[in-house]
Amino acid sequence: MSKLDNQTVVVGRLAPSPTGVLHLGNARSFLLAWLDLRSRGGHMVLRMEDLDGPRVKAGAARLAMEDLRWLGLDWDEGPIYQRPRLEIYSSYLQRLAEAGLAYPCVCTRKDVEQAASAPHPGEEGPVYSGTCRGLWRSAIEAQKQTGKLPCWRFAIPVGTTVDFSDRICGATSLDLAQQGGDFVIWKKDNEPAYQLAVVVDDAEQKINSVVRGDDLISSAGRQILIYQAFGFPVPEFAHVSLVVGTDGRRLAKRHGDTTVRQFREQGISSAQILRMLAATFTNAISVPLDRIHQASDLLPGFRLEAVGSKPVQWDGKELLA
Ligand code: GLU
């Protein structure tokens, strides 16, 4: 994957999932994505990732947009919603199925756990052993023979490792067959899984620069396999560290007031939030913190590569880099 040259317009995206309100961690990732793009004169797409089934909350898309605007983060195109695009994703699944790169799978979560030769606890879950690979040519055939609704999995070619250079995390090498194995690209409830939807959208929306939280770094490996399967150009990736609580766990309700909205309701200004966020990446900016009044004040001399991959902690009052 080559770095974008000076002639190429950088096209990035803000891709919130409307599943809740924006917390400090999302706000930091979005701010970094916005600063990187605007400092390079790019074009920003706002994409609402509203395919997350029951987790999507009514009204959350509007609230997410309000919070972004309140922080001073804008976009040039969108919002583009995923839900109206179901048929498009379906046609891409078809292409993978026809190429023999995707197959129907009727295994339950329990089946997957039991068949895992070497369970890898943690984010990735157990490695899928490939039980259903090569058994059926279509979802209908799988359903007829088993009486179960199938999902679709991407068939990772044997011996594949994915190597890429992340702008923050550096050289990254992922052995995906050992980290989760063949992954779901279409869910049993007949909707695309995140991995497929995000690649189709990023490719169709001409996204060439992705900046997002580092919980998605192994997803980048899976997505690169899908880009390559379609012959799409692979964007450049930057995975920024997540914000965690003092317990080292990802920021959530248990950590108290962490949402942009709660701070706003307490009378905290967007400038104060921006300063608190910027205090976690002072290496990447050239403006003193007390001169920051709006997001664009952070732009002169901003350099995403200097942000660093150190975890950021929320101690209940402030963010500590
Ligand atoms: N919608 C995802 C999230 O809010 C981001 C996905 C992505 O950037 O690829 O975590």
Image (cartoon, grey):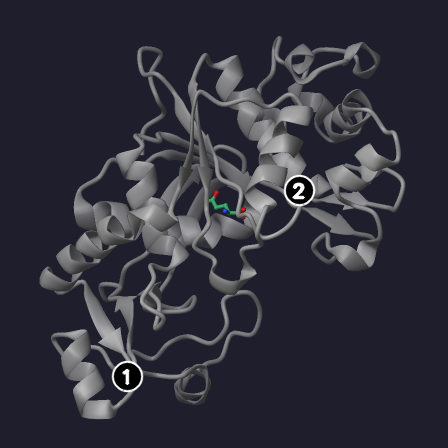
Question: Which quarter of the figure is the C terminus placed in?
Answer: top right
For badge 1, the amino acid type reads Thr
Q: Quadrant of residue 194?
A: bottom left
Rendered view: 249 above or below 260: below
N-terminal of the pair, mark 1 or mark 2, is 2
Residue 308 seen in this snapshot = no
Residue drawn where x is 77% and y is 13% of the image: 293
User: What percent of the width, then of the height, locates residue 37?
Assistant: 49, 21
Q: Give SS at disc 2.
A: loop
Q: Nearer the viewer, residue 200 or 122?
A: 200
Choose mark 1 or mark 2, whichever is in front: 2
Q: Quadrant of residue 318?
A: top right
Rendered view: 178 above or below 290: below
Q: How far is the residue under mark 1 from the one under mark 2? A: 39 Å
Residue 22 is tagged as: 2
Residue 301 seen in this snapshot = yes
User: What percent of the width, then of the height, locates residue 94?
Assistant: 16, 59
Judged left or right of residue 56, residue 297 is right
Judged left or right of residue 118, residue 259 is right
Q: Nearer the viewer, residue 315 or 14?
A: 14
Residue drawn where x is 74% and y is 25% of the image: 274
Q: Residue beneath label 1, please? A: 131
User: What percent of the width, then of the height, locates residue 141?
Assistant: 14, 82
